Image (tube, grey):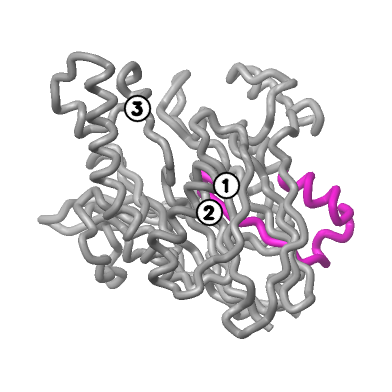
């Protein structure tokens, strides 16, 4: 029997308006920044109009990207709450995929903006095998102190031992596929942010992501036994906001682009991959084809990288030795620079920067569950 599994950061699937941009310019949408706004009341009205005007096209593209994964179970990041997920699935996705995703699960995590991880699943796989939901466990409450993960580097970032490790959550979802058990860990790690303390954003926030990765590994080892994790069926899905490799982009549209593979010396992914604890099956693809996000801060800082992961336990990796994931890129905005030969036909109405399905690409794979 087989299962189609996917992960996707849908970016700000909200059912509320965010007015924080009135006082914090970092949160202000670029559209409103063009206009002189005289009061908070006026700002709120304009923000409502802007959000509604932008939302429909974006969510159509988001739904198209999810539909293209053909997933039986999909892990999502940046979901406001279950009501937002239900409204999106019924209003957009259901029209595209027929019976849709009848079962949806999320819980409030630790993100200050309220963007959480979620899981949607069908009642059965595309091959008719029943998908049975057993339980969902949140680990949002775990602290650095509880897991012995507080470090001087975290203290330097102002993190106290009693504070929570996960910036969102690590949702542990137990299911049975045709009677066979599978455990899914749905995560969304700390974002890189802007440069600080003389370091680039990635290096400055690395200690938090390393702690999150170590906490996920600890949760899995505690669950299955440290000496038996490799024998069990589990998978880690989500946006880890980190990479082990980049495609650095040089050149321009007139003279032509060039792409250079750069390997990183350190990554939070090393916690999972350094000793074979799990396998990143995207690394089964050629180096030039592993990216799930285009990053730019202008022509001097451009690269493609993998931020979105499906990590398999050794047991699942062995029984799926030929499985190679699909990365759905048709929802990318036109500004994304594709390596030669990888260009795709964008979904209708995709814009230069927006609307878009997301800056992230869904990752999907068909797994044999034996």
Residue at x 49% of width, y 37% of height: 191
- Total residue callouts: 3
Quarter containing the C terminus: bottom right
The residue under label 1 is 117
Residue shown at 39%/71% (left/top)? 96
Q: Is residue 238 magenta?
A: yes
Residue 39 shown in magenta: no
Q: Reading the chain from its start, which is encountered first: label 2 or label 1?
A: 2
Q: Position of residue 36 (x, y in %)?
A: 14, 20
Label 1 near label 2: C-beta < 8 Å?
Answer: yes
Q: Which mark is residue 27?
A: 3
**Residue drawn at (29%, 25%), measured in percent from left and top?**
44
Q: Write down the region rendered in magenta.
A: 216-243
Q: CA distance from mark 2 to mark 1?
A: 6 Å
Q: Quadrant of residue 74?
A: bottom right
Q: With respect to residue 100, does 48 lie above or below?
A: above
Q: Earlier in the sequence, mark 1 or mark 3?
A: 3
Callout 2 crowding tier (Cα within 10 Å): few <14, some 14–19, many ≥20: many
Distance between mark 3 and mark 2 Cα atoms: 23 Å
Q: Position of residue 282 (x, y in %)?
A: 53, 65
Q: Choose top left, top right, bottom left or bottom right for residue 316.
A: bottom right
Q: Is residue 313 visible?
A: yes
Please give the residue where the numbered disc 2 appears in the rendered image.
76
Residue 172 circle label: none
Q: Does residue 49 appear left or right of residue 102 in this picture? A: left
Quarter of the image holding residue 155?
top right
């Amino acid at each position: 029997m087989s299962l189609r599994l996917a992960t996707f950061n849908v970016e700000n699937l909200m059912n509320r308006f965010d007015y924080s941009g009135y006082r914090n310019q970092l949160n202000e949408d670029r559209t409103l920044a063009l206009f002189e706004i005289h009061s908070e009341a006026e700002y709120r009205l304009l923000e409502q109009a802007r959000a509604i005007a932008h939302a429909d096209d974006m969510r159509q593209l988001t739904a198209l990207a999810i539909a293209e994964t053909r997933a039986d179970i999909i892990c999502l990041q940046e979901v406001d709450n279950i009501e937002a997920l239900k409204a999106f699935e019924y209003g957009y996705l259901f029209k595209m995929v027929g019976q849709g995703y009848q079962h949806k699960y999320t819980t409030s995590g630790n993100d200050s903006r309220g963007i959480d991880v979620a899981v949607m699943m069908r009642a059965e796989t595309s091959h008719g095998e029943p998908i049975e939901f057993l339980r969902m466990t949140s680990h949002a409450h775990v602290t650095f102190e509880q897991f012995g993960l507080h470090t001087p580097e975290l203290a330097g970032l102002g993190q106290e031992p009693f504070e929570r490790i996960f910036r969102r959550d690590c949702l542990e979802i137990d299911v049975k596929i045709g009677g066979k058990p599978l455990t899914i860990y749905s995560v969304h790690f700390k974002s890189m942010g802007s440069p600080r303390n003389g370091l680039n954003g990635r290096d400055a926030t690395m200690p938090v992501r390393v702690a999150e990765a170590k906490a996920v590994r600890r949760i899995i080892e505690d669950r299955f036994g440290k000496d038996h994790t490799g024998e069990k069926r589990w998978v880690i899905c989500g946006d880890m906001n980190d990479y082990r490799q980049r495609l650095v982009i040089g050149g321009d549209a007139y003279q032509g682009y060039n792409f250079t593979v750069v390997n990183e010396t350190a990554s939070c992914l090393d916690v999972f991959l350094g000793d074979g604890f799990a396998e990143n099956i995207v690394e089964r693809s050629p180096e030039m084809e592993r990216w799930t996000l285009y990053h730019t801060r202008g022509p001097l800082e451009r690269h493609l990288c993998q931020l979105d992961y499906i990590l398999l336990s050794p047991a699942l990796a062995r029984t799926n030795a030929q499985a190679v994931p699909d990365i759905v890129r048709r929802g990318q905005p036109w500004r994304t620079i594709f390596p030669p030969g990888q260009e795709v036909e964008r979904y209708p109405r995709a814009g230069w920067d927006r609307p878009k399905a997301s800056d992230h690409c869904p990752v999907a794979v068909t797994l044999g569950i034996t």
